[in-house]
Image (cartoon, helix red, strand yellow):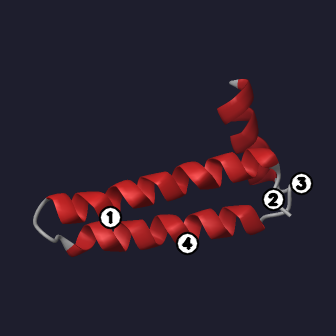
Amino acid sequence: MATLEQQVIADHLRAVAQWRRDKMHEFDPDPRNLRSAAGLEELADYWNALPEDDERVIELTNLTFLGQ
């Protein structure tokens, strides 16, 4: 189960993915925006699936929320 910190980071990734989809509709339909959005969604799912004691989760959590 994802920690609150993991969920916050995943939510940010999903927000950026939505921004990419919105940009595709705002400008010419560039397929790179949809590909990027799909990759960000996949990354968010992967991130939330990592165990909370994974060193990548600990490191990014410390950098993001504690500035360490």
Q: Which residue is mark 3?
A: 53
Q: Which residue is mark 1?
A: 21
Q: Which residue is mark 2?
A: 2
Left or right placement of residue 66 versus residue 37 in this view: right
Which secondary structure lies at badge 1? helix
The label on residue 51 is: none
Q: Which residue is mark 4?
A: 42
Left or right placement of residue 52 versus residue 40 in this view: right
Of tags 1 and 2, the one toward the viewer is 1
* Quadrant occupied by the N terminus: bottom right
Residue at x 83% of width, y 51% of height: 3
Of tags 1 and 4, the one toward the viewer is 1
Label 1, label 3: how far apart the Cα atoms are: 33 Å
Residue type at tag 4: Glu
What is the quadrant of residue 64 in the picture? top right
Of tags 1 and 3, the one toward the viewer is 1
Residue type at tag 1: Arg
